[in-house]
Amino acid sequence: MPDYVVRCGVMRTLHVMQSKAEFRRGTKVIARTGRGLEVGEVLCEADQRVLAQMVDPPAGTIQRELTASDEHELRRIESCAEQEAERCLRAIRDLGLKMDLVDVEHLFGGERIVVYYLAEGRVDFRELVRRLNAEFQTRVEMRQIGVRDEAKLLADYGDCGKPVCCNTHLSSMPPVSMKMAKLQKATLDPNKISGRCGRLKCCLRYEFDTYQENQRALPRVGAEVVTRDGRARVLAQELLSMQVLVQMEDGRRVMISADDVLSTIRKKPSARS
């Protein structure tokens, strides 16, 4: 039987799981992971092409397809998680801890409850864990997360009108820099290029490699080139259309295709005095 890629938990972690049965994409299953018994969603078969794109995915085993009884139990657990979050928040306030509760995840098998929180520094939550362990009668795990993970847990839709990427198809957060926005000539207004997390939008990363390849393929700004109509100097690059704005020897400024650039003139370095 094939192995499958299965997405589990509120953090939507991708696992490679063994199975004794075959499953279709989108099938909800009960799976055994390193954390315990969880509900997961089958995404695809874990063939060599898929595995080559994954970095050290956690393992697991598919136990069975989600049954009607499992769905009823899942609804009960989700209802309990809401109450557990309220009790956890009350305990945080009673202890005066400098942390913000983000979410509470109750695993399907009941092996543990995971508390996700934000904090500027380290928090001594030992007394909180002792209190919650006694109250919930199960293992409580505290997990500090960042603002991007908070968006992954709580955000709904982005400026594009679609569900946020971090809560749909992204399994890890790509590094994003202002350099990517500048190269793509995006607005540099932070309010327009920041996502729900307040950080630069992940989608700025998607086309960056293509922009870089196109930039390398075009003559650089300031270069002297030979075109079909004579010599010219490059004033600007249009990366997506693969064109350059050039100034001809007679002063005319024209936009030409990269194919119309016959060669780039390399200037000899000036002799040192």
Image (tube, rainbow, N blue to C red):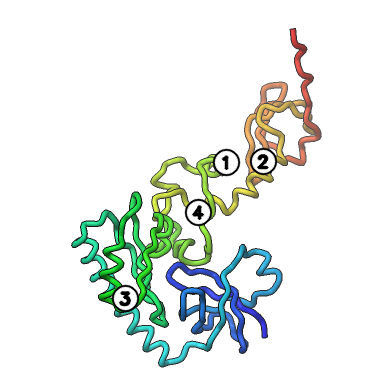
Q: Do the residues bearing badges 2 and 1 touch, measured as CB atoms within 8 Å?
A: yes
Nearest to the eye among marks 3 and 2: give it. Answer: 3
Q: Do the residues bearing badges 1 and 3 touch, measured as CB atoms within 8 Å?
A: no
Q: Specify the amino acid type for callout 3.
A: Ala
Q: Secondary structure at mark 4?
A: helix
Dot label at residue 215: 2
- What residue did someone put label 4 on? 202
Name the residue at 59% across, 85% down: 23
Count residues near mark 4 (Cα–Cα under 10 Å), then give few for <14, some for 14-19, many for 20+. many
Q: Secondary structure at mark 3?
A: helix
Q: Do the residues bearing badges 4 and 3 touch, measured as CB atoms within 8 Å?
A: no
Nearest to the eye among marks 1 and 3: give it. Answer: 3
Observer-nearest of 262 and 1: 1
- What residue did someone put label 1 on? 183
- What residue did someone put label 3 on? 81
User: Quadrant location of residue 216?
Assistant: top right
Observer-nearest of 198 and 189: 198
Q: Secondary structure at mark 1?
A: helix
Upstream in sequence: badge 4 or badge 1:
1
